[in-house]
Amino acid sequence: CQEAVQSAAVCRGASDGSAAGAELGFRKGAQRIRSEEAQHDPALPPWFASYDPGAAKSILNNGRTCRVVFDDTFDRSVLRGGPIQGAYRLRQLHFHWGSSDDHGSEHVVDGVKYAAELHMVHWNPKHGNFAPALKQRDGVAIVGVFLKVGKTLKREMKRILEEMESIKTKGKETPFLHFDPSILFPKSRDYWTYEGSFTTPPCEECVTWILLREPIVVSPDQMAKLRSLSMNTENEPFHPLVDNWRPQQPLKGRVVRASFK
Ligand SMILES: CCOC(=O)CCc1ccc(S(N)(=O)=O)cc1
Ligand SMILES: [Zn+2]
């Protein structure tokens, strides 16, 4: 399951988007956001991330993305506020990216596809563990951050990208310690939020999406580093790890709220 390279199995909503769709997959897949249709909700509070750098454990290539894994055995690195109630624990972060700078993000805003998208996956400890949280409508909260390519580099991405050499092929994992991923956030805390699902199987409809409006800027060389990963194991023929994003699904009447006017 998890963040799979683009394939036929896309998380689709119910075909007719009917009210029943809410039960039949109406929440599935990443969405096309139309900013003029998003409803500003003045009651939406700011969100806060308080992450312990000591919670960072390792970075890995699972053949579908590169992922940083965090200790989530207690409320050590948590997300609070915004559309969620209580503190959700940070479990992992990963990326989706394209084979060129003009595409790669899983969400599309007003028709704009970004070069990449960072997902920071948190789960609600009131459900005891990550697995049971996947079955709950308030089980998971994912902060999505767009990456666009510009002239400047995102120096806060350097440590992650320096590890690409050591996780070049599928199955490679290496320790990744003392890292606070909140340094990756853009300046603005403005966000869109909607109730959705994972963008890849198991497509559980358990996700509160918190999609940041402001992209972070990375350099062409930094994007090239991400694209230097391979889908294959070290004993298999080379297959570049690119285009590990999923086509967006129509909103079908889903309400997207904005924290900003
Ligand atoms: C059965 C275990 O299921 C999982 O671990 C879910 C993994 C998973 C986590 C996050 C995402 S994403 N791209 O929507 O941020 C997709 C899949
Ligand atoms: Zn993802």
Image: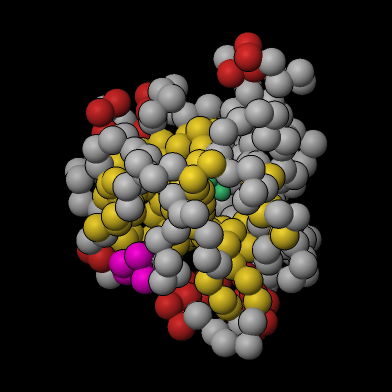
Rendering coords of residue 140 (x, y %)? 41, 36
Residue occupying image coordinates x 51% and y 38%: 194
**Residue 55 makes an appearance in the image:** no
* Span shown in magenta: 179-183
**Residue 3 makes an appearance in the image:** yes
Q: Quadrant of residue 200?
A: top right
In this rendering, position of residue 54 left or right of residue 185: left
Residue found farthest to the top: 20
Rendering coords of residue 67 (x, y %)? 49, 57
Q: Nearer the viewer, residue 257 or 95?
A: 257
Q: Nearer the viewer, residue 204 or 72?
A: 204
Look at the image and tell me in which quarter the N terminus lies: top right
In this rendering, position of residue 214 left or right of residue 74: right
Magenta run includes residue 80: no
Q: Nearer the viewer, residue 71 or 213?
A: 213
Residue occupying image coordinates x 53% and y 27%: 205
Rendering coords of residue 15 (x, y %)? 77, 20
